Amino acid sequence: MEAATNPKKNKRKFKQTKQLVRLAINEGWKQSEIATACRSHQSIVSDWYKGIKQGTEEALMPLLEIYGHKLRRNSFRAYWSVSLKTKERVYYKVEGNVIFSQAFCFTRVASHKKYKQLPMNKLVIHHQGKSRFRAVLQSRFKLPTDHELESTIEDSFWNSEITSQLDLPGLLNFIEQYSEKNLKDYPCDANTLPFIARQALLNHGFDIEGVVEYPAFW
């Protein structure tokens, strides 16, 4: 059976439409002015304002160019790293929603021959708008005694490396390389990560080349 494809893919919805429109309204915009700027209708803007509907990034771009930075301020995570040689500490602030986060564990023998799953590496992906992404590669800090660092704040026990911005094809290529090079000790994760990452991207509305689609028609 031949796979069905959808030649008219829906444009990705902007999940923070309501917050964006309300920011503009609070800054003095009228719904009619937003409709004109976004080439839409006032009734549609009203639905955006109420959270009934979501606009596309393309339609909302006039507002995103003005107020997008204010939304990003409320969407970030803090990371840090420590140089093994110099002990220098560097702190990072990475903006954008986290759309993927996966920890990779090894099995450690604990007391009484019980097994404990301990996450030792982690991959986090931020979406930074306009199909741009930034990946955070994390490894667990170790104490001088060679014991793993523990904390009630999870982000504090990860040594983090931040990548440059990646477009969607670049991100997918990065994930393939990460699976091959960084997950040699985690064969199950190395094989499943490319699928899990694509699943997360699809769930967030991104169109991925090479994915065979079977659309429904209502």
Image (cartoon, helix red, strand yellow):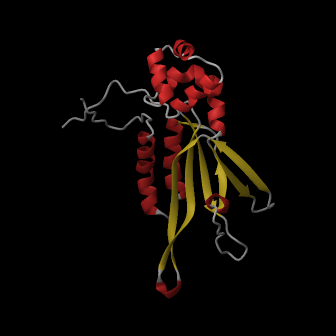
Question: Could you tell me which residue is drawn at 76 percent across and 52 percent down?
Answer: 90
Residue most extreme to the bottom: 112
Q: Toward the viewer: 41 or 104? A: 41
Residue 134 is drawn in which quadrant? top right
Q: Is residue 139 left or right of residue 91?
A: left
| Whole-percent x, y for residue 175 in the image | 51, 47
Of 51 and 168, nearer the camera is 51
For this rendering, which residue is in front, 40 or 213?
Answer: 40
Q: Position of residue 173 (x, y in %)?
A: 50, 42
Give left or right: position of 192 versus 213. right
Write the residue at 57% across / 33% down: 129
Farthest residue toward the left? 1
190 and 67: which one is in front?
A: 67
Residue at the spot x=65%, y=63% of the render?
Answer: 157
- Counting from the top left corner in percent of width and height, residue 162 is at 65, 47
**Residue 56 seen anywhere in this rendered image of the structure:** no
Indicate the quadrant containing the N terminus: top left, top right, bottom left or bottom right: top left
Q: Name the side, left or right, on which 3 lies relative to 200.
A: left
Question: How many marks can you see?
Answer: 0
Q: Position of residue 190 (x, y in %)?
A: 46, 57
174 up-or-down from 57: above or below: below
- Residue 148 showing in the rendered view: yes
Q: Residue at x 68, y 52 (%)?
A: 79
Q: Quadrant of residue 182?
A: bottom right
**Is 43 above or below relative to 198?**
above
From the viewer's perspective, tell me whether residue 163 is left or right of residue 14.
right
User: In which quadrant of the rendered image does the C terminus lie?
Assistant: top left
